[in-house]
Image (cartoon, rainbow, N blue to C red):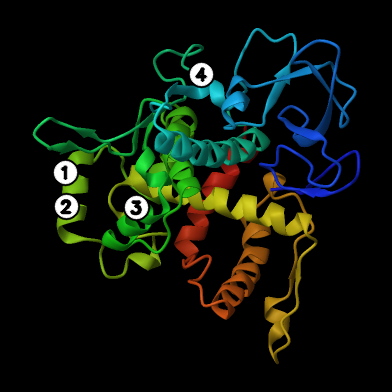
Amino acid sequence: MKLFECQNCHQPLYFENTLCERCGYRLGYLPDARTLSAIDPTSDDGVWSALATTEPLYKFCANAELDACNWMLPADSAETHCAACRHNRTIPDLSDTANLTLWRKLELAKHHLFYTLTNLNLPLETRTENPEEGLAFDFLTDTVAPDGTVTPVLTGHANGLITINIAEADDAERERRRSDMGEPYRTLLGHFRHEIGHYVWDRLVRDDEAVLERFRALFGDEREDYGEALQRHYANGAPPDWQANYVSSYATAHPWEDFAETWAHYLHIVDTLETARAFGLRIRPRITEGADLESEIDFNPHKARDIDDLIEPWLPLTYAVNSLNRSMGQPDLYPFILSPSVIEKLGFMNRMMRDL
Protein backbone atom coordinates (compact mmCIF):
# COMPACT_ATOMS: atom_id res chain seq x y z
CA MET A 1 0.00 0.00 0.00
CA LYS A 2 1.18 3.53 -0.74
CA LEU A 3 1.83 6.13 1.94
CA PHE A 4 -0.59 8.97 2.51
CA GLU A 5 -0.17 12.44 3.98
CA CYS A 6 -2.47 15.22 5.06
CA GLN A 7 -2.72 17.82 2.29
CA ASN A 8 -3.14 20.54 4.91
CA CYS A 9 -0.18 19.88 7.26
CA HIS A 10 1.70 16.95 5.62
CA GLN A 11 1.29 14.65 8.61
CA PRO A 12 1.87 11.01 7.54
CA LEU A 13 -1.39 9.08 7.56
CA TYR A 14 -2.56 5.48 7.67
CA PHE A 15 -5.10 4.18 5.15
CA GLU A 16 -7.75 3.76 7.85
CA ASN A 17 -7.33 7.21 9.45
CA THR A 18 -10.45 9.37 9.62
CA LEU A 19 -8.90 12.42 11.30
CA CYS A 20 -5.50 14.08 11.05
CA GLU A 21 -4.08 13.97 14.56
CA ARG A 22 -1.87 17.01 13.91
CA CYS A 23 -4.23 19.59 12.38
CA GLY A 24 -7.64 18.04 13.05
CA TYR A 25 -8.77 17.87 9.43
CA ARG A 26 -11.43 15.28 8.57
CA LEU A 27 -10.13 12.64 6.14
CA GLY A 28 -11.76 10.56 3.43
CA TYR A 29 -10.47 8.02 0.93
CA LEU A 30 -11.15 8.84 -2.73
CA PRO A 31 -11.09 5.52 -4.62
CA ASP A 32 -11.03 7.10 -8.08
CA ALA A 33 -8.06 9.28 -7.17
CA ARG A 34 -6.62 6.44 -5.05
CA THR A 35 -5.65 8.75 -2.25
CA LEU A 36 -6.62 9.67 1.29
CA SER A 37 -7.59 13.34 1.35
CA ALA A 38 -8.14 16.07 3.88
CA ILE A 39 -11.62 17.44 3.28
CA ASP A 40 -13.51 20.67 3.94
CA PRO A 41 -17.24 20.88 4.64
CA THR A 42 -19.33 22.94 2.23
CA SER A 43 -22.48 24.92 2.84
CA ASP A 44 -24.47 21.81 1.91
CA ASP A 45 -24.87 19.40 4.82
CA GLY A 46 -22.93 16.17 4.25
CA VAL A 47 -21.09 17.48 1.18
CA TRP A 48 -17.32 17.94 1.21
CA SER A 49 -14.58 19.32 -0.99
CA ALA A 50 -11.27 17.45 -1.13
CA LEU A 51 -7.89 19.14 -0.84
CA ALA A 52 -6.28 16.36 -2.88
CA THR A 53 -8.23 16.98 -6.07
CA THR A 54 -10.09 19.59 -8.07
CA GLU A 55 -12.81 17.07 -8.89
CA PRO A 56 -16.46 17.71 -7.98
CA LEU A 57 -17.73 17.45 -4.44
CA TYR A 58 -17.94 14.28 -2.35
CA LYS A 59 -20.08 12.60 0.29
CA PHE A 60 -19.24 9.83 2.73
CA CYS A 61 -20.34 6.24 2.41
CA ALA A 62 -23.35 5.53 4.60
CA ASN A 63 -21.24 3.16 6.69
CA ALA A 64 -19.09 6.09 7.84
CA GLU A 65 -21.85 6.85 10.35
CA LEU A 66 -21.10 3.46 11.92
CA ASP A 67 -17.35 4.14 11.99
CA ALA A 68 -16.89 1.24 9.58
CA CYS A 69 -15.77 3.08 6.44
CA ASN A 70 -13.84 6.22 5.46
CA TRP A 71 -14.42 5.98 1.70
CA MET A 72 -16.20 8.68 -0.28
CA LEU A 73 -18.18 8.91 -3.49
CA PRO A 74 -19.30 11.81 -5.70
CA ALA A 75 -21.86 13.99 -3.94
CA ASP A 76 -24.26 13.69 -6.88
CA SER A 77 -24.08 9.88 -6.98
CA ALA A 78 -27.33 7.98 -6.60
CA GLU A 79 -25.43 5.39 -4.57
CA THR A 80 -25.44 5.62 -0.77
CA HIS A 81 -22.52 3.23 -0.23
CA CYS A 82 -18.97 3.35 -1.53
CA ALA A 83 -17.37 1.08 -4.13
CA ALA A 84 -16.38 -1.39 -1.39
CA CYS A 85 -19.44 -1.35 0.88
CA ARG A 86 -22.01 -1.72 -1.90
CA HIS A 87 -20.82 -5.32 -2.30
CA ASN A 88 -22.17 -6.20 1.17
CA ARG A 89 -25.27 -8.41 1.04
CA THR A 90 -25.58 -9.36 4.72
CA ILE A 91 -24.03 -7.81 7.81
CA PRO A 92 -24.44 -9.03 11.40
CA ASP A 93 -26.93 -7.67 13.91
CA LEU A 94 -25.21 -4.42 14.88
CA SER A 95 -27.40 -3.88 17.95
CA ASP A 96 -25.02 -6.40 19.52
CA THR A 97 -21.97 -4.29 20.36
CA ALA A 98 -19.68 -7.31 20.04
CA ASN A 99 -20.92 -7.85 16.49
CA LEU A 100 -20.35 -4.17 15.70
CA THR A 101 -16.74 -4.37 16.89
CA LEU A 102 -16.05 -7.49 14.85
CA TRP A 103 -17.79 -6.12 11.75
CA ARG A 104 -15.62 -2.99 11.84
CA LYS A 105 -12.54 -5.21 11.78
CA LEU A 106 -13.98 -7.13 8.83
CA GLU A 107 -14.63 -3.91 6.96
CA LEU A 108 -11.09 -2.67 7.53
CA ALA A 109 -9.66 -5.86 6.01
CA LYS A 110 -12.20 -5.81 3.16
CA HIS A 111 -11.37 -2.19 2.28
CA HIS A 112 -7.68 -3.05 2.26
CA LEU A 113 -8.54 -5.82 -0.20
CA PHE A 114 -10.52 -3.46 -2.42
CA TYR A 115 -7.64 -0.99 -2.45
CA THR A 116 -5.50 -3.61 -4.20
CA LEU A 117 -8.28 -4.96 -6.43
CA THR A 118 -9.04 -1.50 -7.79
CA ASN A 119 -5.35 -0.81 -8.36
CA LEU A 120 -5.19 -4.02 -10.41
CA ASN A 121 -8.30 -2.92 -12.35
CA LEU A 122 -10.14 -6.18 -11.68
CA PRO A 123 -13.76 -6.41 -12.88
CA LEU A 124 -15.96 -6.00 -9.80
CA GLU A 125 -19.67 -6.27 -10.55
CA THR A 126 -22.15 -5.97 -7.69
CA ARG A 127 -25.07 -8.34 -7.16
CA THR A 128 -27.34 -5.63 -8.59
CA GLU A 129 -25.30 -5.47 -11.78
CA ASN A 130 -24.98 -9.24 -12.03
CA PRO A 131 -27.61 -11.02 -9.89
CA GLU A 132 -26.20 -14.48 -10.63
CA GLU A 133 -22.46 -14.03 -10.11
CA GLY A 134 -21.84 -10.47 -8.94
CA LEU A 135 -19.40 -10.09 -6.05
CA ALA A 136 -21.16 -9.98 -2.68
CA PHE A 137 -20.34 -10.61 0.98
CA ASP A 138 -22.32 -12.26 3.75
CA PHE A 139 -20.86 -11.60 7.21
CA LEU A 140 -22.60 -14.14 9.43
CA THR A 141 -22.55 -15.51 12.98
CA ASP A 142 -22.89 -19.09 14.17
CA THR A 143 -26.46 -19.97 15.13
CA VAL A 144 -27.38 -21.63 18.42
CA ALA A 145 -30.52 -23.79 18.65
CA PRO A 146 -32.69 -23.83 21.82
CA ASP A 147 -31.06 -27.11 22.82
CA GLY A 148 -27.62 -25.50 22.62
CA THR A 149 -26.62 -27.09 19.32
CA VAL A 150 -24.33 -24.76 17.38
CA THR A 151 -24.52 -24.56 13.61
CA PRO A 152 -21.24 -23.00 12.49
CA VAL A 153 -20.89 -20.61 9.59
CA LEU A 154 -18.28 -21.83 7.13
CA THR A 155 -16.15 -19.25 5.38
CA GLY A 156 -16.24 -19.84 1.63
CA HIS A 157 -17.22 -18.77 -1.88
CA ALA A 158 -20.03 -19.77 -4.22
CA ASN A 159 -20.81 -18.01 -7.52
CA GLY A 160 -19.48 -14.65 -6.44
CA LEU A 161 -20.92 -14.79 -2.91
CA ILE A 162 -18.24 -14.78 -0.23
CA THR A 163 -19.31 -15.84 3.26
CA ILE A 164 -17.15 -14.87 6.23
CA ASN A 165 -17.77 -16.04 9.79
CA ILE A 166 -17.40 -12.89 11.87
CA ALA A 167 -15.70 -14.98 14.59
CA GLU A 168 -12.62 -14.75 12.35
CA ALA A 169 -12.41 -11.09 13.42
CA ASP A 170 -11.90 -12.18 17.05
CA ASP A 171 -8.13 -12.37 17.46
CA ALA A 172 -8.21 -15.09 20.12
CA GLU A 173 -10.67 -17.25 18.18
CA ARG A 174 -8.75 -16.85 14.94
CA GLU A 175 -5.50 -17.83 16.67
CA ARG A 176 -7.18 -20.90 18.13
CA ARG A 177 -8.35 -21.96 14.70
CA ARG A 178 -4.93 -21.25 13.22
CA SER A 179 -3.32 -23.50 15.82
CA ASP A 180 -5.95 -26.25 15.55
CA MET A 181 -5.63 -26.37 11.77
CA GLY A 182 -1.83 -26.20 11.74
CA GLU A 183 -1.69 -23.04 9.64
CA PRO A 184 1.45 -20.88 9.82
CA TYR A 185 -0.50 -17.81 8.71
CA ARG A 186 -4.15 -16.91 9.27
CA THR A 187 -5.38 -13.33 9.09
CA LEU A 188 -8.61 -11.57 8.18
CA LEU A 189 -7.00 -9.99 5.14
CA GLY A 190 -5.64 -13.39 4.16
CA HIS A 191 -9.17 -14.85 4.22
CA PHE A 192 -10.46 -12.10 1.96
CA ARG A 193 -7.57 -12.52 -0.45
CA HIS A 194 -8.07 -16.28 -0.64
CA GLU A 195 -11.83 -16.16 -1.16
CA ILE A 196 -11.62 -13.43 -3.78
CA GLY A 197 -9.29 -15.78 -5.64
CA HIS A 198 -12.26 -18.08 -6.31
CA TYR A 199 -14.20 -15.12 -7.71
CA VAL A 200 -11.23 -14.22 -9.91
CA TRP A 201 -11.09 -17.78 -11.23
CA ASP A 202 -14.74 -17.60 -12.22
CA ARG A 203 -14.30 -14.24 -13.94
CA LEU A 204 -10.92 -14.58 -15.64
CA VAL A 205 -10.20 -18.30 -16.07
CA ARG A 206 -13.34 -20.43 -16.24
CA ASP A 207 -14.77 -19.12 -19.53
CA ASP A 208 -11.55 -18.38 -21.42
CA GLU A 209 -10.39 -21.55 -23.16
CA ALA A 210 -6.81 -20.36 -23.70
CA VAL A 211 -6.40 -19.25 -20.08
CA LEU A 212 -8.12 -22.39 -18.81
CA GLU A 213 -5.69 -24.57 -20.76
CA ARG A 214 -2.72 -22.78 -19.20
CA PHE A 215 -4.36 -23.08 -15.78
CA ARG A 216 -4.78 -26.85 -16.08
CA ALA A 217 -1.19 -27.29 -17.18
CA LEU A 218 0.01 -25.59 -13.97
CA PHE A 219 -2.64 -26.27 -11.33
CA GLY A 220 -4.29 -29.48 -12.52
CA ASP A 221 -7.76 -30.38 -13.76
CA GLU A 222 -10.43 -28.57 -11.76
CA ARG A 223 -13.04 -31.07 -13.03
CA GLU A 224 -11.86 -33.45 -10.31
CA ASP A 225 -14.70 -33.92 -7.79
CA TYR A 226 -14.25 -31.07 -5.31
CA GLY A 227 -16.05 -32.68 -2.38
CA GLU A 228 -14.11 -35.92 -2.66
CA ALA A 229 -10.85 -34.00 -3.00
CA LEU A 230 -11.50 -32.08 0.23
CA GLN A 231 -12.48 -35.24 2.10
CA ARG A 232 -9.27 -36.90 0.97
CA HIS A 233 -7.23 -33.87 2.01
CA TYR A 234 -8.73 -33.69 5.49
CA ALA A 235 -8.38 -37.46 5.93
CA ASN A 236 -4.82 -37.84 4.66
CA GLY A 237 -3.30 -34.37 4.75
CA ALA A 238 -0.86 -32.97 2.20
CA PRO A 239 1.79 -35.16 0.57
CA PRO A 240 5.17 -34.98 2.34
CA ASP A 241 6.84 -33.19 -0.57
CA TRP A 242 4.09 -30.59 -1.05
CA GLN A 243 6.44 -27.60 -0.69
CA ALA A 244 8.07 -28.49 -4.00
CA ASN A 245 4.91 -27.57 -5.91
CA TYR A 246 2.50 -25.71 -3.63
CA VAL A 247 2.56 -22.50 -1.63
CA SER A 248 0.66 -24.09 1.29
CA SER A 249 -0.51 -27.52 2.39
CA TYR A 250 -4.15 -26.53 1.79
CA ALA A 251 -3.30 -25.71 -1.81
CA THR A 252 -2.80 -29.44 -2.40
CA ALA A 253 -6.49 -30.17 -1.78
CA HIS A 254 -7.82 -29.26 -5.24
CA PRO A 255 -6.77 -27.09 -8.23
CA TRP A 256 -9.35 -24.46 -7.22
CA GLU A 257 -7.77 -24.18 -3.76
CA ASP A 258 -4.29 -24.12 -5.25
CA PHE A 259 -5.36 -21.19 -7.43
CA ALA A 260 -6.99 -19.32 -4.53
CA GLU A 261 -4.00 -19.84 -2.23
CA THR A 262 -1.56 -18.75 -4.92
CA TRP A 263 -3.72 -15.73 -5.76
CA ALA A 264 -3.73 -14.71 -2.09
CA HIS A 265 0.06 -14.81 -2.07
CA TYR A 266 0.20 -12.80 -5.25
CA LEU A 267 -1.76 -10.06 -3.46
CA HIS A 268 0.46 -10.40 -0.37
CA ILE A 269 3.51 -9.80 -2.55
CA VAL A 270 2.11 -6.93 -4.61
CA ASP A 271 0.72 -5.03 -1.64
CA THR A 272 3.78 -5.48 0.58
CA LEU A 273 6.18 -4.49 -2.19
CA GLU A 274 4.16 -1.33 -2.79
CA THR A 275 4.49 -0.48 0.90
CA ALA A 276 8.23 -1.16 0.79
CA ARG A 277 8.53 1.08 -2.26
CA ALA A 278 6.58 3.84 -0.50
CA PHE A 279 9.09 3.75 2.35
CA GLY A 280 12.05 3.72 -0.04
CA LEU A 281 13.34 0.48 1.42
CA ARG A 282 16.67 -0.85 0.26
CA ILE A 283 18.11 -4.15 1.46
CA ARG A 284 21.91 -4.22 1.85
CA PRO A 285 22.90 -7.09 4.21
CA ARG A 286 26.24 -6.58 5.95
CA ILE A 287 27.58 -10.09 5.53
CA THR A 288 30.22 -11.57 3.26
CA GLU A 289 27.78 -12.70 0.59
CA GLY A 290 25.28 -9.93 1.25
CA ALA A 291 25.41 -8.79 -2.37
CA ASP A 292 23.21 -11.77 -3.29
CA LEU A 293 20.48 -10.36 -1.05
CA GLU A 294 20.74 -6.71 -2.06
CA SER A 295 17.56 -5.15 -3.41
CA GLU A 296 15.86 -1.82 -3.89
CA ILE A 297 12.13 -1.64 -4.48
CA ASP A 298 11.80 1.24 -6.93
CA PHE A 299 8.98 0.17 -9.26
CA ASN A 300 5.18 -0.10 -9.17
CA PRO A 301 4.42 -3.77 -8.39
CA HIS A 302 0.87 -3.41 -9.75
CA LYS A 303 2.46 -2.87 -13.18
CA ALA A 304 5.18 -5.53 -13.02
CA ARG A 305 5.86 -6.84 -16.54
CA ASP A 306 7.18 -10.21 -15.39
CA ILE A 307 6.96 -12.26 -12.22
CA ASP A 308 10.73 -12.08 -11.82
CA ASP A 309 10.33 -8.33 -11.31
CA LEU A 310 8.33 -9.17 -8.17
CA ILE A 311 10.24 -12.19 -6.90
CA GLU A 312 13.71 -10.66 -7.21
CA PRO A 313 13.08 -8.05 -4.47
CA TRP A 314 10.55 -10.19 -2.58
CA LEU A 315 13.00 -12.83 -1.39
CA PRO A 316 15.51 -10.36 0.15
CA LEU A 317 12.68 -8.32 1.65
CA THR A 318 11.06 -11.31 3.36
CA TYR A 319 14.43 -12.50 4.65
CA ALA A 320 14.91 -9.04 6.19
CA VAL A 321 11.45 -8.70 7.73
CA ASN A 322 11.51 -12.27 9.04
CA SER A 323 14.79 -11.43 10.75
CA LEU A 324 13.24 -8.30 12.25
CA ASN A 325 10.31 -10.30 13.57
CA ARG A 326 12.65 -12.84 15.15
CA SER A 327 14.45 -9.96 16.86
CA MET A 328 11.14 -9.10 18.51
CA GLY A 329 10.45 -12.71 19.47
CA GLN A 330 7.66 -12.93 16.89
CA PRO A 331 6.98 -15.65 14.28
CA ASP A 332 8.23 -15.06 10.77
CA LEU A 333 6.14 -12.46 8.96
CA TYR A 334 6.22 -14.58 5.79
CA PRO A 335 6.71 -18.26 6.75
CA PHE A 336 6.50 -19.70 3.25
CA ILE A 337 8.83 -21.19 0.66
CA LEU A 338 8.45 -20.14 -2.95
CA SER A 339 9.66 -23.03 -5.06
CA PRO A 340 10.23 -22.67 -8.84
CA SER A 341 6.84 -24.34 -9.43
CA VAL A 342 5.08 -21.88 -7.13
CA ILE A 343 6.84 -18.93 -8.78
CA GLU A 344 5.63 -20.19 -12.15
CA LYS A 345 2.07 -20.23 -10.78
CA LEU A 346 2.53 -16.71 -9.46
CA GLY A 347 3.67 -15.79 -12.96
CA PHE A 348 0.33 -17.07 -14.24
CA MET A 349 -1.39 -14.57 -11.92
CA ASN A 350 0.80 -11.70 -13.05
CA ARG A 351 0.18 -12.50 -16.71
CA MET A 352 -3.57 -12.46 -16.12
CA MET A 353 -3.27 -8.98 -14.64
CA ARG A 354 -1.18 -7.72 -17.55
CA ASP A 355 -3.74 -9.09 -20.01
CA LEU A 356 -6.69 -7.24 -18.45
Label 4 to label 1, Cα distance in Å?
Answer: 31 Å
Image-based side of 100 in relation to 228, left or right: right
The residue beneath circle 1 is: 228
Specify the amino acid type for callout 4: Thr
**Decide: marks 3, 4 in contact (CB < 8 A)?**
no
Of the two numbered discs 4 and 1 on the same chain, state the one appearing first in sequence: 4
What whole-number distance in Å separates the C-alpha atoms at marks 3 and 1?
28 Å
Q: CA distance from mark 3 to mark 4?
A: 30 Å
Residue type, mark 2 in image = Arg
Of 219 and 311, nearer the camera is 311
Q: Is residue 81 left or right of residue 301?
A: left
The answer to which of marks 3 and 2 sits earlier in the sequence is 3
Give the label, 4 or 1, closer to the camera: 4
User: In the displayed structure, would residue 68 be above or below residue 251?
Assistant: above
Q: Can the viewer see residue 198?
A: no
How many labels sit on residues?
Answer: 4
Q: Which residue is mark 2?
A: 232
Looking at marks 2 and 4 on the same chain, the residue that comes earlier in the sequence is marked by: 4
Q: Is residue 286 above or below residue 331?
A: below
Name the one closer to the observer, 199 or 176.
176
Q: Which element type, helix, strand or loop, lies under badge 1? A: helix
Q: Which residue is mark 4?
A: 126
Question: What's under tag 1, amino acid-wise?
Answer: Glu
Local SS, label 2: helix
Of mark 3 and mark 1, the one earlier in the sequence is 3
Q: Quadrant of residue 311?
A: bottom right
